[in-house]
Amino acid sequence: STASEHLGRLRGEAERLAPDDERPHHTELPDDLVPADAEGAQALLRTANTELADATATLDTARAAHSELLHAHRTAEDSAGGFDETATLLRDLLRDHGAEEGTEDPDPYPGSLEEARQSAA
């Protein structure tokens, strides 16, 4: 009786989810998968449910990886935008600095490189 109730629920769900048009929308099982009896059908159902659970887990993993990749992509795009803004600012500063006339080249530090580093620190 439990199997009959389960079968009734499955039939009702299949009718509820079936498309409205008259074309057939079902899949025929290959001859080697057609169950010979109720036990065979239950075994096929268990196998199908196991495969569905595995596929669902794989899909969830793929969705999580996709979400991480999207986040990394957006972060990279934001970083690239910041880099472009900084590059534009530096370009403008260099152009403005080069446009100044009457500026003299700075004199080199009269001492050694080590002395220059110490005086800068």
Image (spheres, helix red, strand yellow):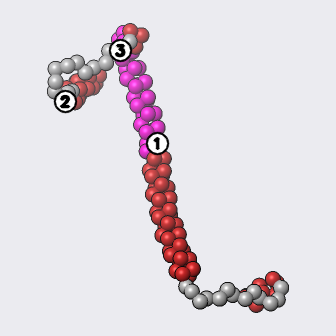
- Disc nearest the viewer among 1 and 2: 1
Q: Could you tell me what secondary structure mostly forms the magenta stretch?
A: helix
Rate crowding at label 1 as few (under 14), some (14 to 19) or many (20 or more) other CA atoms within 10 Å: few
Region in magenta: 34-63
Q: Which residue is mark 2?
A: 16
* Location of residue 55 in the rendering, given as x and y in whole percent from the top left corner: 44, 33
In this rendering, the answer to whether 94 lies above or below 39 is: below
Label number found at residue 29: 3
Q: Which residue is mark 1?
A: 62
* Location of residue 88 in the rendering, given as x and y in whole percent from the top left corner: 50, 71
Relative to the observer, which residue lies in front, 60 or 114?
114
Quarter of the image with the N terminus in it: top left
Magenta span has 69? no
Q: Is disc 2 placed on a helix, strand or loop?
A: helix
Please give left or right for residue 38 compared with residue 109 in the image.
Answer: left
Q: Earlier in the sequence, mark 3 or mark 1?
A: 3
Quarter of the image with the C terminus in it: bottom right
- Disc nearest the viewer among 3 and 1: 1
In this rendering, the answer to whether 51 lies above or below 90 is: above
- Tell me the kind of residue under disc 3: Leu
Relative to the observer, which residue lies in front, 74 or 65?
74
Q: Residue at x 45, y 52 (%)?
A: 70
Q: Residue at x 41, y 20 (%)?
A: 43
